[in-house]
Image (tube, rainbow, N blue to C red):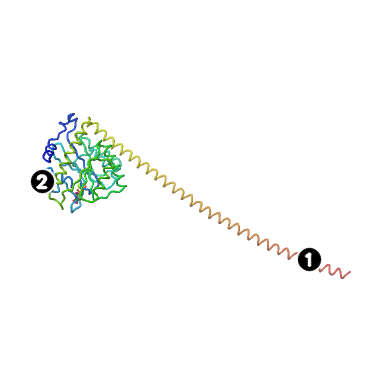
Amino acid sequence: MDDEQWRRKIKNFSFDKCKKGNQGFQRILLQLFGYVGHGKSSFINSVICAWFKTNFKNYANAAGTDESHTTQRLTYGLTNNIVLVDNRGCASMSAYESGEIFAQLGNLLPLDQGVGWSKGFGLADRIVEAEPLVKASDFIIPIFVYSVKNYPTPDLKDELKKIFKHAQDLTAVIPIVVLTNNNHPNYKEITNMFTDIGTDKIFALENYTEKSPRRKVETDSAVIRFLYEVIGYAEFQAEHRQDPDQEMMERKWFVLKFIHERELKTQTQNLQREIDKQKANMEQEAKKREEEEGKMLQKIREQYQEKEKEMQQQFERERLRKQYEHEQRMKELEKKIGKNGRRK
Ligand SMILES: Nc1nc2c(ncn2[C@@H]2O[C@H](COP(=O)(O)OP(=O)(O)O)[C@@H](O)[C@H]2O)c(=O)[nH]1
Ligand SMILES: [Mg+2]
């Protein structure tokens, strides 16, 4: 098949034409996620340019000279049935631990609105508030965007494994990988890393950017092939799925349970920290008291020694006095005896 045939297939895609009918699904929601600055918004620009055959424009507000990053979940419709979502990027794994990214990926927060980060149960409230605004009929395909410029490390691989596991648990779909900056020499290592993680759908391209806006056959073809494969993937996945409302409910439970467990963990940690703090205070207090008691004991000992010395001196004085008296008495006696002797 050539590009034009693929385009026709993409354009005509509808869940209604799937083997088992639409099963309640209407649109494919290509949920872009990944670290900040890896080219999510640029990829959307590339897809728009290639799909609509237009000149480059920064449609998705990719970071340019002003270094602005995406802070909204904006949607970009390609056809009536295929929509791209530019999710807010995150800097590290800790953002996944916050549940916020799950809620975005699971399509539990409204589209085309600003995305914040909530503390505590704030996220759960936002998910509940969003209920009337989110559509269960959106079929989510997670697309993980990664820039080849970033060299893989063992830590990164472990982190990505966790992220992919969470994304798959949540959406029931293994994320598709889009590698940007694919002319970079790290390309082979990065591809191997993602293959090791268990993804078999990896697409690579050099995005259209402000610096390199000229359309190229390779980039256009990479985008069209990507979209074609994605609809094939969605058709295949949809055959095994039956109940979008139930799936949405399960996703909601997954995230709410996650938030609950995270809160419980945070509260337990806070409590433990408080206990540890009090224990440390008590130990410090006990040590202080021990030191004070030690000082007091030392003082008593010194007083006692002082007294003992005094008594010793008194005794010595007494002894000398007694000795002197005794000697005096002896002298007197000697004198008397001497006189009497002479008298004899
Ligand atoms: N050379 C090159 N630069 C890219 C590519 N993709 C994105 N960029 C640049 O990387 C920066 C971040 O891209 P952006 O799309 O805003 O990342 P996001 O935070 O994931 O949305 C921007 O300066 C882009 O011009 C690519 O494939 N090749
Ligand atoms: Mg962005």
Residue 94 coordinates in the image, percent (x, y)? 30, 45
Q: Which residue is drawn at the image coordinates 28% and 47% (left, top)?
A: 92
The residue singled out by tag 2 in the image is 54
Q: Mark 2 or 1 closer to N-term? A: 2
Residue 164 coordinates in the image, percent (x, y)? 27, 41
The residue singled out by tag 1 in the image is 330
Instruction: Indicate the quadrant where residue 253 lies.
Output: top left
Q: How many marks are shown on the rendered structure?
A: 2
Mark 1 CB lies closer than 8 A to ligand 1: no
Residue type highlighted by circle 1: Met
The quarter of the image holding the N terminus is: top left
- Label 2 environment density (alpha carbons within 10 Å; few <14, some 14–19, many ≥20): few
- Label 1 environment density (alpha carbons within 10 Å; few <14, some 14–19, many ≥20): few
Residue 148 coordinates in the image, percent (x, y)? 23, 49
Q: CA distance from mark 2 to mark 1?
A: 138 Å
Nearest the eye: 98 or 337: 98
Instruction: Indicate the quadrant where residue 309 lies.
Output: bottom right
Q: Nearer the viewer, mark 2 or mark 1?
A: 2
Residue type highlighted by circle 2: Thr
Q: Which residue is drawn at the image coordinates 27% and 33% (left, top)?
A: 250
Residue 277 coordinates in the image, percent (x, y)? 41, 47
Q: Is 185 above or below relative to 168? A: below
Instruction: Indicate the quadrant where residue 327 lies.
Output: bottom right
Mark number, residue 247: none
Q: Secondary structure under badge 1?
A: helix
